[in-house]
Protein backbone atom coordinates (compact mmCIF):
# COMPACT_ATOMS: atom_id res chain seq x y z
CA UNK A 1 0.00 0.00 0.00
CA UNK A 2 0.95 3.63 -0.19
CA UNK A 3 2.81 5.34 2.58
CA UNK A 4 3.52 9.02 2.72
CA UNK A 5 5.19 10.19 5.88
CA UNK A 6 6.70 13.30 7.31
CA UNK A 7 9.96 13.24 9.22
CA UNK A 8 8.93 15.81 11.84
CA UNK A 9 5.44 16.51 13.10
CA UNK A 10 6.34 20.04 14.31
CA UNK A 11 8.82 22.66 13.25
CA UNK A 12 9.55 26.05 14.81
CA UNK A 13 11.61 28.69 13.01
CA UNK A 14 12.50 32.30 13.61
CA UNK A 15 10.91 34.87 11.37
CA UNK A 16 13.22 35.58 8.46
CA UNK A 17 14.93 32.21 8.57
CA UNK A 18 14.50 29.55 5.92
CA UNK A 19 12.28 26.54 6.63
CA UNK A 20 12.69 23.03 5.32
CA UNK A 21 9.86 20.53 5.59
CA UNK A 22 10.54 16.95 4.61
CA UNK A 23 8.42 14.13 3.31
CA UNK A 24 9.14 10.49 2.51
CA UNK A 25 7.10 8.42 0.09
CA UNK A 26 7.12 4.71 -0.55
CA UNK A 27 5.87 4.22 -4.11
CA UNK A 28 8.69 4.65 -6.57
CA UNK A 29 6.12 4.69 -9.38
CA UNK A 30 4.43 7.87 -8.11
CA UNK A 31 4.69 10.43 -10.85
CA UNK A 32 3.39 13.66 -9.37
CA UNK A 33 3.74 15.39 -6.02
CA UNK A 34 2.07 18.36 -4.40
CA UNK A 35 2.68 20.44 -1.31
CA UNK A 36 -0.30 21.93 0.47
CA UNK A 37 -0.62 24.48 3.25
CA UNK A 38 -3.51 24.26 5.65
CA UNK A 39 -4.34 27.05 8.04
CA UNK A 40 -6.58 26.55 11.01
CA UNK A 41 -10.22 26.17 9.99
CA UNK A 42 -9.46 26.13 6.28
CA UNK A 43 -9.02 23.54 3.60
CA UNK A 44 -5.59 22.64 2.21
CA UNK A 45 -4.26 25.24 -0.19
CA UNK A 46 -2.06 24.31 -3.13
CA UNK A 47 1.49 25.67 -2.79
CA UNK A 48 3.62 24.02 -5.43
CA UNK A 49 3.83 20.82 -7.39
CA UNK A 50 6.47 18.79 -9.17
CA UNK A 51 6.41 15.97 -11.67
CA UNK A 52 8.64 12.96 -11.32
CA UNK A 53 10.74 13.93 -14.34
CA UNK A 54 12.00 16.97 -12.44
CA UNK A 55 14.35 17.34 -9.46
CA UNK A 56 13.56 20.89 -8.47
CA UNK A 57 10.89 23.48 -8.97
CA UNK A 58 10.75 27.01 -7.67
CA UNK A 59 7.88 29.27 -6.89
CA UNK A 60 7.56 32.52 -5.04
CA UNK A 61 9.67 32.01 -1.87
CA UNK A 62 9.13 28.24 -2.10
CA UNK A 63 11.19 25.49 -3.66
CA UNK A 64 10.34 21.83 -3.90
CA UNK A 65 13.10 19.25 -4.24
CA UNK A 66 12.50 15.69 -5.33
CA UNK A 67 15.02 12.93 -4.75
CA UNK A 68 13.68 9.85 -6.45
CA UNK A 69 16.66 7.74 -5.43
CA UNK A 70 15.69 7.88 -1.77
CA UNK A 71 12.04 8.71 -2.36
CA UNK A 72 12.23 12.00 -0.55
CA UNK A 73 10.46 15.29 -1.10
CA UNK A 74 11.18 18.57 0.61
CA UNK A 75 9.64 22.01 0.73
CA UNK A 76 11.89 24.98 1.33
CA UNK A 77 10.37 28.29 2.37
CA UNK A 78 12.67 31.28 2.13
CA UNK A 79 12.52 34.17 4.60
CA UNK A 80 9.74 32.57 6.61
CA UNK A 81 7.00 34.94 7.72
CA UNK A 82 4.38 34.69 10.49
CA UNK A 83 1.76 34.10 7.81
CA UNK A 84 3.55 30.90 6.88
CA UNK A 85 2.52 29.32 10.18
CA UNK A 86 0.30 26.41 9.21
CA UNK A 87 0.27 22.66 8.68
CA UNK A 88 2.04 21.53 5.53
CA UNK A 89 1.11 18.31 3.71
CA UNK A 90 2.80 16.49 0.93
CA UNK A 91 0.79 14.37 -1.46
CA UNK A 92 1.81 11.84 -4.08
CA UNK A 93 -0.15 10.61 -7.06
CA UNK A 94 0.28 7.05 -8.19
CA UNK A 95 -0.08 5.77 -11.71
CA UNK A 96 -3.71 4.95 -10.94
CA UNK A 97 -4.29 8.68 -10.41
CA UNK A 98 -4.95 8.19 -6.73
CA UNK A 99 -3.58 10.78 -4.28
CA UNK A 100 -2.07 9.85 -0.92
CA UNK A 101 -1.36 12.40 1.78
CA UNK A 102 1.08 12.65 4.65
CA UNK A 103 -0.18 13.47 8.13
CA UNK A 104 1.33 16.93 8.01
CA UNK A 105 4.02 19.04 9.67
CA UNK A 106 2.98 21.95 11.84
CA UNK A 107 5.17 24.97 11.15
CA UNK A 108 5.30 27.71 13.76
CA UNK A 109 7.06 30.96 12.95
CA UNK A 110 8.44 32.79 15.96
CA UNK A 111 8.39 36.59 15.56
CA UNK B 1 -13.03 31.80 -11.29
CA UNK B 2 -14.90 30.56 -8.24
CA UNK B 3 -13.21 27.94 -6.09
CA UNK B 4 -14.53 24.72 -4.66
CA UNK B 5 -17.62 25.38 -2.54
CA UNK B 6 -18.63 23.14 0.31
CA UNK B 7 -21.83 23.50 2.28
CA UNK B 8 -22.61 23.71 5.08
CA UNK B 9 -19.43 24.94 6.79
CA UNK B 10 -20.43 23.61 10.19
CA UNK B 11 -22.86 20.95 11.30
CA UNK B 12 -23.83 19.41 14.61
CA UNK B 13 -25.71 16.12 14.62
CA UNK B 14 -26.60 13.53 17.22
CA UNK B 15 -25.63 9.89 17.14
CA UNK B 16 -27.84 7.78 14.92
CA UNK B 17 -28.81 10.63 12.63
CA UNK B 18 -27.77 10.92 9.03
CA UNK B 19 -26.14 13.85 7.25
CA UNK B 20 -25.66 15.07 3.68
CA UNK B 21 -22.77 17.30 2.66
CA UNK B 22 -22.44 19.13 -0.63
CA UNK B 23 -19.51 20.04 -2.86
CA UNK B 24 -19.63 22.25 -5.94
CA UNK B 25 -16.47 21.96 -8.01
CA UNK B 26 -14.59 24.57 -9.96
CA UNK B 27 -16.24 25.12 -13.31
CA UNK B 28 -14.99 22.52 -15.75
CA UNK B 29 -13.74 20.12 -13.08
CA UNK B 30 -15.47 16.79 -13.47
CA UNK B 31 -13.62 14.82 -10.80
CA UNK B 32 -14.68 15.23 -7.19
CA UNK B 33 -12.98 13.41 -4.34
CA UNK B 34 -13.98 13.34 -0.69
CA UNK B 35 -11.70 13.08 2.32
CA UNK B 36 -12.16 12.79 6.04
CA UNK B 37 -9.65 14.70 8.12
CA UNK B 38 -9.10 14.03 11.81
CA UNK B 39 -6.19 15.06 14.04
CA UNK B 40 -5.03 11.51 14.57
CA UNK B 41 -5.49 10.08 11.08
CA UNK B 42 -4.80 12.97 8.79
CA UNK B 43 -6.49 12.96 5.39
CA UNK B 44 -8.31 9.72 4.66
CA UNK B 45 -9.67 9.12 1.18
CA UNK B 46 -13.38 8.33 1.03
CA UNK B 47 -14.24 8.15 -2.67
CA UNK B 48 -13.89 9.81 -6.03
CA UNK B 49 -16.59 10.57 -8.56
CA UNK B 50 -16.13 11.33 -12.22
CA UNK B 51 -18.95 11.92 -14.68
CA UNK B 52 -21.55 10.71 -12.17
CA UNK B 53 -19.71 7.43 -11.56
CA UNK B 54 -17.74 6.35 -8.53
CA UNK B 55 -14.23 5.78 -9.80
CA UNK B 56 -12.33 4.96 -6.60
CA UNK B 57 -13.31 4.10 -3.10
CA UNK B 58 -11.41 4.20 0.17
CA UNK B 59 -11.65 1.91 3.14
CA UNK B 60 -14.74 3.26 4.88
CA UNK B 61 -17.89 1.41 5.94
CA UNK B 62 -21.01 1.38 3.84
CA UNK B 63 -22.54 4.09 6.03
CA UNK B 64 -20.51 6.50 3.93
CA UNK B 65 -21.88 7.00 0.45
CA UNK B 66 -21.83 9.59 -2.24
CA UNK B 67 -23.13 10.60 -5.60
CA UNK B 68 -22.44 13.06 -8.35
CA UNK B 69 -24.89 14.97 -10.48
CA UNK B 70 -24.76 15.83 -14.15
CA UNK B 71 -23.45 19.33 -13.31
CA UNK B 72 -20.54 17.66 -11.44
CA UNK B 73 -21.77 18.76 -8.03
CA UNK B 74 -21.35 16.00 -5.52
CA UNK B 75 -22.94 15.01 -2.25
CA UNK B 76 -21.77 12.63 0.40
CA UNK B 77 -24.05 11.01 2.94
CA UNK B 78 -23.26 9.45 6.27
CA UNK B 79 -25.98 7.38 7.88
CA UNK B 80 -26.31 6.21 11.47
CA UNK B 81 -23.77 8.71 12.69
CA UNK B 82 -21.22 7.70 15.33
CA UNK B 83 -19.17 9.90 17.61
CA UNK B 84 -16.07 8.89 15.68
CA UNK B 85 -17.48 10.44 12.53
CA UNK B 86 -16.75 13.88 13.94
CA UNK B 87 -14.22 15.35 11.52
CA UNK B 88 -13.53 17.89 8.84
CA UNK B 89 -14.87 16.59 5.53
CA UNK B 90 -13.06 17.96 2.53
CA UNK B 91 -13.72 17.66 -1.14
CA UNK B 92 -11.11 18.17 -3.82
CA UNK B 93 -11.76 18.65 -7.50
CA UNK B 94 -9.68 18.54 -10.64
CA UNK B 95 -10.01 18.86 -14.36
CA UNK B 96 -9.14 16.36 -17.05
CA UNK B 97 -5.47 17.25 -16.88
CA UNK B 98 -5.15 15.34 -13.56
CA UNK B 99 -3.30 18.29 -12.09
CA UNK B 100 -4.44 21.32 -10.15
CA UNK B 101 -6.05 19.32 -7.40
CA UNK B 102 -8.02 21.97 -5.47
CA UNK B 103 -9.67 21.64 -2.09
CA UNK B 104 -12.70 23.31 -0.65
CA UNK B 105 -12.75 24.77 2.86
CA UNK B 106 -14.49 21.74 4.24
CA UNK B 107 -17.50 20.95 6.37
CA UNK B 108 -16.84 20.58 10.08
CA UNK B 109 -19.13 17.82 11.36
CA UNK B 110 -19.57 17.32 15.08
CA UNK B 111 -21.51 14.31 16.31
CA UNK B 112 -22.79 14.52 19.88
Image (cartoon, rainbow, N blue to C red):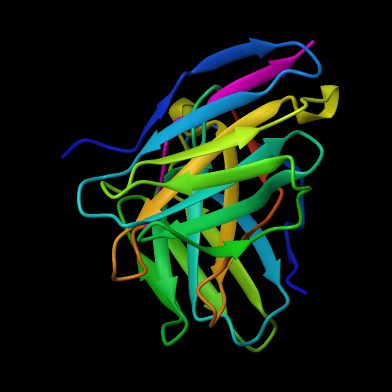
Q: Quadrant of residue A83?
A: top left
State the residue at coordinates (58%, 65%). Answer: B56
> Looking at this view, is B42 or A18 the one in front?
B42
**B102 falls in the magenta region:** yes
Q: Quadrant of residue B95?
A: bottom left
On screen, residue B75 above or below B109:
below
**B23 falls in the magenta region:** no
> Looking at this view, is A109 or B82 the one in front?
B82
Residue B69 in the image, given as x and y percentages of width and height: 35, 46
> Looking at this view, is B44 or A87 the one in front?
B44
> Looking at this view, is B88 or B63 the one in front?
B63
State the residue at coordinates (36%, 69%). Answer: B98
Residue B37 in the image, given as x and y percentages of width and height: 67, 38
Residue B61 shows in the view: yes
Q: Classify the position of the C terminus of chain B by image quarter.
A: top right
Residue A69 in the image, given as x and y percentages of width and height: 65, 89
Q: Classify the position of the N terminus of chain B by image quarter.
A: top left
Relative side of A52 to B43, left or right:
left
State the residue at coordinates (57%, 80%). Answer: A30
Relative side of A10 to A107, left or right:
right
On screen, residue A15 above or below B44:
above
State the residue at coordinates (42%, 71%). Answer: A50
Residue A18 shows in the view: no
Q: How many marks?
A: 0
Residue A65 in the image, given as x and y percentages of width and height: 50, 71
On screen, residue A61 above or below A68:
above
Which residue of the protein is positioned furthest toward the left in this rendering? B1
On screen, residue A35 above or below B18:
below
Q: Quadrant of residue B15?
A: top right
Relative side of A9 to B66, left or right:
right
The magenta segment = B101-112
Amino acid sequence: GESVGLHLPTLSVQEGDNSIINCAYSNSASDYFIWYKQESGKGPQFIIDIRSNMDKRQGQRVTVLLNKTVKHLSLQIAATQPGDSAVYFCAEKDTGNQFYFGTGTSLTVIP
Amino acid sequence: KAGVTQTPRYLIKTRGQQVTLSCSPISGHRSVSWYQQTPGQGLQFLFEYFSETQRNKGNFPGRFSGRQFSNSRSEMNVSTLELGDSALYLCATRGDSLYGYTFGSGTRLTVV
